[in-house]
Image (cartoon, helix red, strand yellow):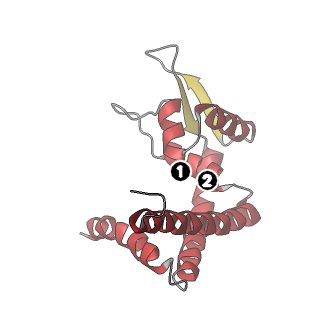
Amino acid sequence: MSATDPALTSLSQGWCALSLLHGKIEAHIERALEANHGLSVREFSLLDVLSRQHDGEGGHLQMKQVADAVVLSQSATTRLVTRLEDRGLLSRYLCPTDRRGIYTNVSEAGLRLLAEARPTNDTALREALDEAAKNPELAPLVTAVEALGVPAQRAATA
């Protein structure tokens, strides 16, 4: 295959379209969360991921797992955790069974802010997807994203 192979060109165009869709969605959500709640998309994502932890077996995430979940490096995740901890939205503590491990929990203030911000996030996501669906290059990707939520919605209503 050469760099001008139609299959590679098509693949590259698909990747560019996906990247464009992601950027448009993230920018729209970012503006809404910042304006209404003083949160970035990454901060919202971190609070959301950490709010889903539980006290049972495997319920707490290590920082590497958190970094993977919010798609950041471990060092960037640590800086993000520190910023949210400084705002009183998170707290850190040592793992009771492994003193080298540090866990992070969302504080009550963080849970309240997350609950307030979730409808803003959801509305902004819907708006961004609706706008992107008007673009013929992005419409198939919007359809694919929307289809990903269908099984989860069916399970929730069953």
User: In the image, what residue occupies the spot 51% across and 82% down?
Assistant: 133
Q: Toward the viewer: 19 or 130?
A: 19
Q: Position of residue 112 (x, y in %)?
A: 61, 54
User: In the image, what residue occupies the spot 42% across and 64% down?
Assistant: 5
Q: Position of residue 101 (x, y in %)?
A: 51, 20
What's under tag 2, amino acid-wise?
Phe
Q: Is residue 18 visible?
A: yes
Quarter holding the N terminus is bottom left
Image position of 140 with respect to 151: above or below: below
Residues tagged 2 and 1 counted as in contact (Cβ below 8 A): yes
User: In the image, what residue occupies the spot 54% across and 81% down?
Assistant: 130
Q: Toward the viewer: 126 or 74?
A: 74
What's under tag 1, amino acid-wise?
Asp
Q: Name the residue under label 1.
A: 48
Q: Toward the viewer: 128 or 85?
A: 128
Q: Position of residue 7 (x, y in %)?
A: 39, 66
Q: Can residue 149 be seen in this view?
A: no
Counting the numbered discs, the total is 2
Assign a secondary structure to mark 1. helix
87 displayed left or right of 29: right
Category of crowding for the residue at label 2, using alpha-carbon neighbours closer than 10 angstroms: few (below 14), some (14–19), many (at least 20): many
Assign a secondary structure to mark 2. helix
Q: Name the residue under label 2.
A: 44
Image position of 143 with respect to 104: above or below: below
Image position of 62 with respect to 128: above or below: above
Q: Where is residue 148 in the image (x, y as percent from the top left)?
A: 36, 66
